[in-house]
Image (cartoon, coloured by chain):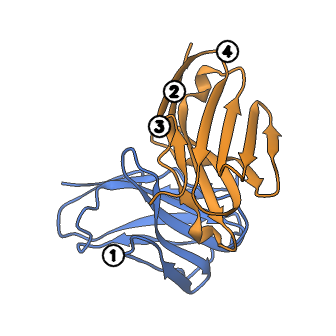
C-alpha cells in the first residue's frame, strides 16, 4: 500500500490565499520530503524535514511534521498563479536508502489569478 | 549549468520494438534512478544504481533493462517484454545512496502506437 498519501487530491484557491496540503504515512520514517511538479515536467525538490524536526521554513513554504500522528503538512503562504502545480510528499524509511523513497499520488494545486 | 538531461522528450514506438531513453548528469552524483509515472499516480521505481558498474531492480523492473558504464550516464531500455510501456519516465540522481533530495530530469514521454 502507498506509504505517503496526500490530502486533498485537488485544491483550488485564489491568488494571495494560503494553501495547505497534508500527507499521512504508515510506518516510521527517517525523513519526509516535498516535491513540486509542473505539468509535463520533472519533479523539483522543495524541502526535507527529518524525523527529529517539527517545523521547517523555506521562503513562502512552511512544513510541519508530527511523528505521533504520522502526518506532515505543507503550507504555501500568499500563493501566486505560478504556484499552480502538483505537489508530492515522499517518505524515506528508517535505515532505508533513497531507493526506498516512497512517493504519494500527489495534490493538484490550482491558483486562480 | 549542472543538472540532469533526459532525451528524447517525446518518443513513439511500435509494439514489439525496444527503445532506449537517455539520462545524463553532470552533478557528479553517485546514485541514479529511473521512475515511471502514470496519470494520477505516484512515482514507481524501475531501477537504481548506487555506483558505476552496479545497478539493482526496483519495484517494477520487469520488461526494462539498464546499464551504468559511466558515472554520468544511466540509460533505460524499454523492451518489447514490457506489456504496458506507455508512460512518463523520470530519471533522477542523488549525491549518494542515503542523502535525501533527488534531482530530476525533465522526463521522457513514451507512447506505444
Residue at far front of view: A68
- Category of crowding for the residue at label 1, using alpha-carbon neighbours closer than 10 angstroms: few (below 14), some (14–19), many (at least 20): some
Q: Residue at x 51, y 37 (%)?
A: A107
**In the depicted structure, whether residue A63 falls above or below residue A50:** above
Query: Disc 1 designates what residue?
Result: B62
Camera-nearest label, 4 or 3: 4
Task: Assess whether mark 4 and mark 2 are in contact (beta carbons under 8 angstroms).
Answer: no
Neighbourhood count class around disc 3 (C-alpha, 10 Å): few under 14, some 14–19, many 20 upward? few
Q: Which chain is orange?
A: A
Residue B112 picture location, percent across and down: 23, 56
Viewer-side residue, A27 vs A6: A27
Front disc: 2 or 4: 2
Q: CA distance from mark 2 to mark 3?
A: 15 Å
Q: Chain of mark 2?
A: A
Of residues A67 and A42, the one nearer the viewer is A67
- Specify whether disc 1 shares its chain with disc 2: no
Q: Residue at x 64, y 59 (%)?
A: B102
Quarter of the image with the C terminus of chain A is top right
Q: Position of residue A10 (x, y in %)?
A: 47, 31
Which of B65 and B37 lies nearest the eye of the viewer?
B37
Both labels 4 and 1 in a single chain = no
Label 2: which residue?
Answer: A11
What secondary structure is marked by label 1? loop
Check disc 4 and report the residue beneath it.
A16
Which residue is pictured at 50% across the width and 43% down the height? A106
- Displayed quadrant of residue B7: bottom left
Amino acid at each position: 500500500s502507498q506509504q505517503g498519501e496526500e490530502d486533498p487530491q485537488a485544491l483550488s484557491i485564489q491568488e494571495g490565499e494560503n494553501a495547505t496540503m497534508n500527507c499521512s504515512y504508515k510506518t516510521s520514517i527517517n525523513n519526509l520530503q516535498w516535491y513540486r511538479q509542473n505539468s509535463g515536467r520533472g519533479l523539483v525538490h522543495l524541502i526535507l524535514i527529518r524525523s527529529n524536526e517539527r517545523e521547517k521554513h523555506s521562503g513562502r513554504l512552511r512544513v510541519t511534521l508530527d511523528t505521533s500522528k504520522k502526518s506532515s503538512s505543507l503550507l504555501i503562504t500568499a500563493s501566486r498563479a505560478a504556484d499552480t502545480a502538483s505537489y508530492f510528499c515522499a517518505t524515506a524509511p528508517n535505515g532505508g536508502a533513497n531507493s526506498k523513497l516512497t512517493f504519494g499520488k500527489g495534490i493538484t494545486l490550482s491558483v486562480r489569478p | 549549468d549542472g543538472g540532469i538531461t533526459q532525451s528524447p522528450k517525446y518518443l513513439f514506438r511500435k509494439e514489439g520494438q525496444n527503445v532506449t531513453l537517455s539520462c545524463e548528469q553532470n552533478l557528479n552524483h553517485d546514485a541514479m534512478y529511473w521512475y515511471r509515472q502514470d496519470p494520477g499516480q505516484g512515482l514507481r521505481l524501475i531501477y537504481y544504481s548506487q555506483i558505476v558498474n552496479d545497478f539493482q531492480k526496483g519495484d517494477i523492473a520487469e520488461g526494462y533493462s539498464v546499464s551504468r558504464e559511466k558515472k554520468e550516464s544511466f540509460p533505460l531500455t524499454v523492451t518489447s517484454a514490457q506489456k504496458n510501456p506507455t508512460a512518463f519516465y523520470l530519471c533522477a540522481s542523488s549525491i549518494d545512496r542515503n542523502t535525501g533530495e533527488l534531482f530530476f530530469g525533465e522526463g521522457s514521454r513514451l507512447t506505444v502506437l
